Image: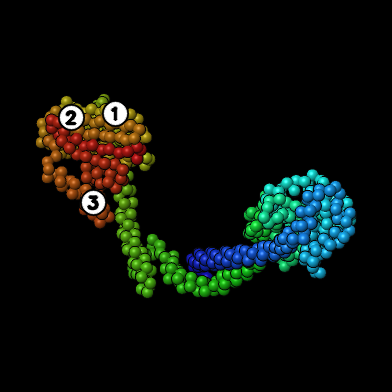
Amino acid sequence: MPKTRRGIMRRLVYTYITIFAVIVLGITIMAYFIIANVSEQTARLNREQLCEQMAAQTMDYLDAMTKIIEQVSSDSRILSMFSSLNNQRAPGNYFEQDILARIDMGSILASYIGPHMRVWRVSLYNEFGDFISSGAPVESLNQAATNLMSTETQALFAQIGQSPKSPLLLPPQDDRWSAVYSGHYVSLVHSLASFYGSEVYGVVEVQQPLELLGQRLFLDRNGDMTAFLLDSQGHQLWPTGEAFKDLDELQYAVVSKELPIYGWTLALAESRDSVLRPFVSVFWLLLIGGGLLVLAMVPVVYIISRRISAPLVRFSRQARTVSLGNLPNNWVSEDPIDEIHELSQAFAAMMERLGTAVVFEKKAYLQALQTQMNPHFLYNTLSVLSAMGLEGSNDNIVYACERLSGLLRYITDASVSTLDKEIGSVKDYLEIMKLRYEDSFFYYIVTEGDLGPVSLPRLILQPLAENCFEHAFKNRLPPWQVDIHALCSDTEWEVRVADNGCGFNEARLAKLESDVALYAGDLPKNYGEMQAGGLGLLNTIVRLKLLGGISYQIKENTPTGTVIILKGEGAI
């Protein structure tokens, strides 16, 4: 395969494959995020539903305790017994002293618990030390009565007295009535009071193991989801291992449900990674599938790129056969692609212009060689004349030859010229004309600033001065005068060449402007009509136009004559 074609093919294939790969990658990432978002929404709905179910189970757990309390606290036998005990206020535990009363009251409480132990324990007590319970036995009624006198229990009585009609849910704690049982227990307490009065006779307390509630809240199906039980102050009641307050909101999604009446809150936390973990494999599957699709598209892209690049390859092969010595006559390609056909037409026009340029280039080389030979011959001749003048003691001939010799040296020098060198060259010319016309001609040259940095083509100012003698002074009696004023600043430079001749008439100025536009607009086409080697005003202005960056202006001088102004910016 040719080198040019490989370059075009490589660029096309790489570009198309890159674009296709970016599109596939973008679709894969977008699909993954859509799936992940849908999954997160589904997981959030599942958490909310599960939280509702677990909250309902917790409510059932507490409602069962509440129902027992309502039944016990409304039993007239229990109210009558504790009303009597409240009036007697005898020291010690009454139920430890009266066995029949203990049996009778224990039977009543057992009937509410039932044979299936709906609650773990039901206890009745007052602040005077009377205590009786049913369910999980206590070690000693006397010890239980002693526990009633603790500071914690006294504070509980005070709290119940503030709201005797509402049950009080205590946080999970150790069994206060016996040291035999381990674990934590949830206690729901309510006052024993008359329906018609505000007097509190005692307290009924229902206890349930926290473990029973934990069995309902245990999530064995998903190890990345945890249930938390919080009280009304936000303190964690369950579980005892992981702290709810330490969960990172960025890593866990949390839903919560407040339990009415009891003031507790059930919170369900699930790891976000666990939600997205199943879809990581989906992402890699999509990514690998997209990669395989990109690989499968490589042959297709290669074929398409080959068809696109084929006309360009043919065009490149034809272009490599072109040289200055082998310019094709008919380059236009009849390619069905419009752009390729237009490109071949443009290239054919360029070949035609290049052929014309080669012809003019050859003429320019011949003319340049001839121009160099003539001053060289004149220089040698003038050297002989200078020697002869010295022998004849004719100082004017010697001086004129020296000036002309300097002028010819300047013309034949191939180095870059500057504005100060141009001033020196035109001064040599004006000195020669001064020797010729003596008192009939005067000239003045004034310079301001550093003219050295301004680069100019050679023979720009001399033709302007020569034009004064060729046209301005022909119909004007002496004395004649030429004033040259050159100045240069940091940003621009300017040269004024003024004479006191007859000036430009409008017809001549219009003809000059027309010729400048003609030759500067298409010099190769009109080059043959210009006088070869001409150094006149037209030649100078056309050269300035082709150079660019220099402007010129021709206007009347005061009181008579013409002023030609050249301007440029910076160093040319």
Q: Are marks 2 and 1 in contact (CB under 8 Å)?
A: no
Q: Position of residue 523 (x, y in %)?
A: 26, 53
Return the residue nearer the eye: 551 or 189: 189
SS of the residue at dot 3?
helix
Residue 447 is tagged as 1
Q: Position of residue 552 (x, y in %)?
A: 24, 40
Return the residue nearer the eye: 274 or 291: 274
Quadrant of the image containing the C terminus: top left
- Counting residues from the start of the chain, the first of labels 2 and 1 encountered is 1
Residue 481 is tagged as 2
Kind of residue at badge 1: Thr
| Relative side of 110 to 571, left or right | right
Kind of residue at badge 3: Tyr
In front of the other: label 3 or label 2?
A: 3
SS of the residue at dot 2?
strand
- Residue density around tag 1, few if under 14, some if 14–19, many if 20 or more, within 10 Å: some
| Relative side of 355 to 184, left or right | left
| Relative side of 7 to 137, left or right | left
C-alpha distance separating marks 3 and 2: 31 Å
Q: Residue at x 67, y 58 (%)?
A: 266
Query: Which residue lies under the disc numbered 3?
Result: 519
Return the residue nearer the eye: 87 or 45: 87
Q: Position of residue 230 (x, y in %)?
A: 69, 54
SS of the residue at dot 1?
strand
Residue 421 is tagged as none
Return the residue nearer the eye: 213 or 413: 213
Kind of residue at badge 2: Gln
| Relative side of 114 to 194, left or right | right
In front of the other: label 2 or label 1?
A: 1
